[in-house]
Image (tube, helix red, strand yellow):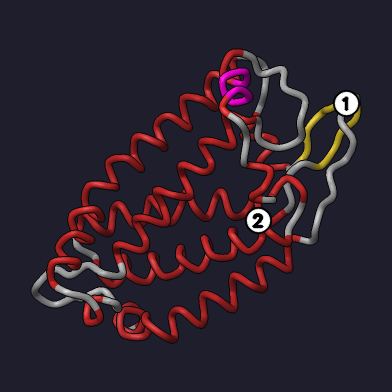
Amino acid sequence: MNRIKVWDSFIRGFHWLLVIALGVLYVSGEEGWLDVHFVTGYTLLALMITRLIWGVIGSDTAKLSALINPPKKVVSALKSDKEQRAGHNAAGSLMVIAFFVLVLLQLITGLFTTDDILVDGPLVQYVSYDLVELAGSIHHSNIDFLIAAVALHVLAIAIYRLRGKQLVKTLLTGKTESTLPQPKMKAGWIAYVVFTILTGLILALWGMEPLNQLIN
């Protein structure tokens, strides 16, 4: 049994930044803190785009291709946690894909939403009012699916902990005990540079007004 690295620094940081951002988005949306809501949303959009890019050029365990599994493997992983692979098992991969879809749907629809009073998403002006209404409806209802997905994720972590697998510890340290060979890792700082550049570009394009409101 060897101690191998399964998560690079960006994947670990991505997870916790995602948790924080979703929490801030939910609270700011409920409280009507729209400047905070928009700035956080733009930052999370940059984070998600970076994650997709890293899913192509990043570490073996970060690859999007590693998340694609046949249904038979997903069912097998749900029945047993003895699947020998570094990173997410087939069932965990399905959960990650679901999260990506739900988060991206929330972010994209947010770009087309309006409160019909003071604040419009940056893309509202380019589409019909019917599409804006549809986007707003999806944006408000999709959050319930996101909350359900988070609850299911927490439950899965608890179940694996009872089975002796410390998923949270592995995500904090990036390392785990395994008989598998060391996956190929890429330097996480590269992804953080991409994230920083994308955040600056998106905020410069759409987020200067809410950002100035927060600063001032």
Q: Secondary structure at mark 1?
A: loop
Name which residue lies at 60% across and 22% down.
72
Closer to the N terminus: mark 1 or mark 2? 2
Q: Is residue 52 above or below residue 154?
A: below
Q: Nearer the viewer, mark 1 or mark 2?
A: 2
Q: Quadrant of residue 164?
A: top right
- Residue 111's spot in the image, x, y percent? 31, 70
Which residue position is annotated with label 2?
A: 55
Which residue position is annotated with label 1?
A: 179
Q: Is residue 97 above or below residue 204?
A: above
Q: Is residue 29 above or below residue 65?
A: below
- Residue 199's spot in the image, x, y percent? 51, 75
Left or right, residue 186 beside residue 215: right
Nearer to us in this view, 143 or 127:
127
- Quadrant of the drawing holding the N terminus: top right
Q: Secondary structure at mark 2?
A: helix
Please provide the residue range marked out in magenta. 72-77
Q: Amino acid at mark 1?
A: Thr
Q: Is residue 64 magenta?
A: no
- Quadrant of the drawing holding the C terminus: bottom left
Left or right, residue 139 beside residue 158: left
Q: Is residue 73 magenta?
A: yes
Q: How much space separates mark 1 and mark 2, taking CA atoms? A: 25 Å
Name which residue lies at 79% across and 61% down.
187
- Residue 161's spot in the image, x, y percent? 60, 21
- Residue 22's spot in the image, x, y percent? 40, 52
Which residue is at the far left?
Answer: 117
10 Å crowding of disc 1: few (<14), some (14-19), many (20+): few
Q: Amino acid at mark 2?
A: Gly
